[in-house]
Amino acid sequence: MNGAKSWVATAVLSACGAVPLAVAAQMTGSDAEWESGRASSYSLIPYTSYGYAGLNLGWADYETPCVGAFTCDNDSFAGKFYTGGMFSRIIGAQIGYINMGEVNRSGGNVQAYGIDISLVANLPLDAFNVFGKIGTTYGWTESRPALVTGLPGGKEDGFGLSYGAGVGFDLTRNWAIVGEWDRHEFRFTTGKDDVDLWSLGVRYKF
């Protein structure tokens, strides 16, 4: 799992490193061409066009505390599905459901999931797309530590900050593969903590 996360991280960071070399060319590109075709493009997000939907699977990395002599896992199988659309060639919006799975912590387990809403800044580079996101996640968590740890157990929910970055590669006009890193802030019984999601997936563009 660590090897897969490292591969996703390398792909995302390498692609993001190309951004400064291409910004000038893209900002003076075909904005008029994009606007001319905008009205005919479908999206599920109001006031946007060039919509898409995607499914990613990967690994979540929990940063919640672990105490005592118990075995604590950091990683869990996780995933998300989402839909989005663009206000312009560069700026868009996205909403999705994330499930961070469940990890063993402090003689028990912890799980987290939520709904994420983000603004997306996208930079198309021919067949590649580099993007960054920032927004908020309304999350639900449940913690079930062993009684001997003294940690509180129970359920929590609330808003937290979310942000991330990724890179996509167009296979066809409609299909793309995507690698992403996301960080979501969740409210646990022990306080607010981040959970990272490293994922690979497919995206269908309407």
Image: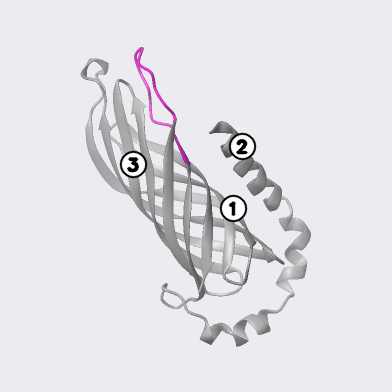
> Crowdedness of circle 1 by 10 Å Cα count: few (<14), some, many (20+)?
many
| Whole-percent x, y for residue 116 in the image | 40, 55
Q: Is residue 157 above or below residue 175?
A: above
Looking at the image, which residue is at 60% across and 64% down?
122
| Whole-percent x, y for residue 51 in the image | 49, 72
Residue that carries the numbered disc 3 in the rendered image: 112
Residue that carries the numbered disc 2 in the rendered image: 6
Q: Residue furthest top?
A: 69
Residue that carries the numbered disc 1 in the rendered image: 166
Label 1 SS: strand
Label 3 SS: strand
Give the foreground label among 2 and 1.
2
Q: Which mark is residue 82?
A: none
Q: Splitting the image into 4 quarters, where does residue 186 fall? A: top left
Of helix, strand and loop, which mostly describes the magenta segment?
loop
Q: Is residue 20 above or below residue 62?
A: below
Closest to the observer, 78 or 20: 78
Tell whether 190 sits left or right of 176: left
Closest to the observer, 194 or 107: 107
Give the foreground label among 3 and 2.
2
Q: CA distance from mark 3 to mark 2?
A: 23 Å
Residue 169: in magenta span: no
Q: Which residues are magenta?
A: 59-74
Looking at the image, which residue is at 29% across and 41% down?
141
Q: CA distance from mark 2 to mark 1?
A: 14 Å
| Whole-percent x, y for residue 164 in the image | 53, 50
> Closer to the N terminus: mark 3 or mark 2?
2
> Closer to the N terminus: mark 2 or mark 1?
2
| Whole-percent x, y for residue 130 in the image | 64, 58
Q: Look at label 2 and name its amino acid.
A: Ser
